[in-house]
Image: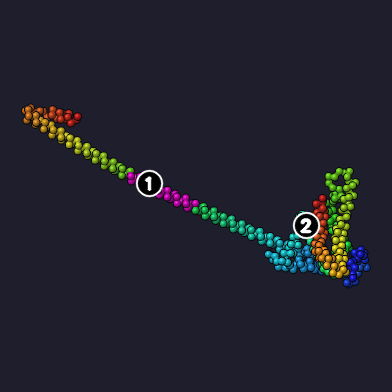
Amino acid sequence: MPQFDIATFSEQIFWLFVIFAILYFLMSKIALPKVGEVLERRQKNIEDNLGKARALKDETDAAIAKYEAALAEARDAAQADIREASEKAAAEQAKKTDAMVKKLTKKTSEAEKAIADAKAEAMTGVAEAASEIAREATDKLIGVKVQAKTADKAVSAIVGE
Amino acid sequence: MAGPLEQFEIKPLAELSVAGIDVSFTNSALWMVIAAVLVTGFMTLSMRRGALVPGRWQGAAEVMYEFVANMLKDNVGSAGRKYFPFVFTLFMFVLFGNLLGMIPHSFTFTSHIAVTFAMALVIFLGVTVIGFMRHGTHYLRMFFPEGAPLATAIILVPIEIISYFSRPFSLAIRLFANMTVGHIMLKVIGGFVGLIGILGVLPFAMLTGITVLEFGIAALQAYVYTILTCIYLHDAIHMH
């Protein structure tokens, strides 16, 4: 078997070491660093892109949050404005109603007073006239001169009933 | 008709000798050069563009790189990083040697015990040196596992010593035997094809199957050679 021909060992081993050493040098100094660099660059590129995507997403989220905050603020402000305006309107309305009620009450009481005055005046007029008529009637009918005071008393007694 | 062993013959292409030692450039050396040139060409030309999105060739080179890198990482861990160029060179050299041997009329330098044993011896000595450099005399614990009862030393130590020193032999003989036997089998069965006339289709069909199998063995033995190297490295770095 040629494999066990010891005479060929030295030439085989010599060239094995020479060629293996050269190949080792070429791999370790030229080929493998290049592959490693390309793989690393690709890894870095992927990570960079992922990082960029994450940053953009964060930015978008922040913008959305900001927009929502602004929207909520605007809504609150608008509601406050509406509340204020409606409160103001209600207060003014209440004031106006109050003034009107006061004015009407005053007018009513004035009118009532006027009616009462007129009624009292009318009543005194009627009583005077009644007592005078009563005196004259007694004088003419029975010839008795009744004192004005007595007549007044009698009339007021009847009217007061 | 050439005998089945003729394919293994070492033929000098240029007679050379240094200090009285024969270092002739032979067919074995020629195929080593071819393997080295192809490995270098494959690993450099394919990466020439260094594209972010790899093409077919670059993808193949990257697959080889990551295959060996993962093998080393899984078996040795991060401490094995500095041995990556050696392990990668070893794997590619053996793989291309085995695969080039499948070309008819080529020469399979990995079918020679001188080559496989020289590599195995370098690996064995290197691993032993690494072990003593990392652990000092504590590396001798390799021959007597931690926690074993002292009385078992009389059996365990000789067994461990034998198993340790048989490493280069098992490494060398496994590759040499696989390559040699595969090629002899191809040659013998190939010889039958012409000899038995029309019935030759039967050995031919068999030959086709065995050729496929031999390609598998070529890749598998390169893998086994490399992974055993990784395991020995693991032992040297982490002990058991």
Answer whether labels 2 and 1 touch (C-beta < 8 Å).
no
Q: Position of residue B135 (x, y in %)?
A: 83, 51
Residue occupying the point 7% across, 27% down? A142
Q: Is residue B187 covered in magenta? A: no
The tally of labels here is 2
| Marks 2/1: CA–CA distance | 85 Å
Q: Which of the numbered marks, if any, corresponds to residue B72?
A: 2
Which marked residue is nearer to the observer: mark 2 or mark 1? Answer: 2
Q: Which of the numbered marks, if any, corresponds to residue A90?
A: 1
- Find residue B108 and report its image quarter: bottom right
Name the image colouring. rainbow
Q: Position of residue B6 (x, y in %)?
A: 89, 68
Helix, strand or loop for disc 2: helix
Residue occupying the point 83% across, 64% down? B206
In the visual, does A38 lie left or right of A53?
right
Residue occupying the point 22% across, 39% down? A114
In the visual, does B121 lie left or right of A141?
right
Q: Is residue A86 covered in magenta? A: yes
**Chain on which label 2 sits:** B
Helix, strand or loop for disc 1: helix
- Find residue B205 and report its image quarter: bottom right
Mark 1: amino acid: Ala
Q: Position of residue B23 (x, y in %)?
A: 89, 68
| Residue A111 in view here | yes
In this view, B237 is above or below B184 = above
Q: Are marks 2 and 1 on the same chain?
A: no
Q: Position of residue A112 (x, y in %)?
A: 24, 39
Residue occupying the point 67% across, 60% down? A44
Residue B222 vs residue A127, the one in the foreground: B222
- How many other residues sit within 10 Å of disc 2, few (<14), some (14-19) or many (≥20)? many
Q: Report the magenta residues as a range.
A: A72-97
In this view, A85 is above or below B184 = above
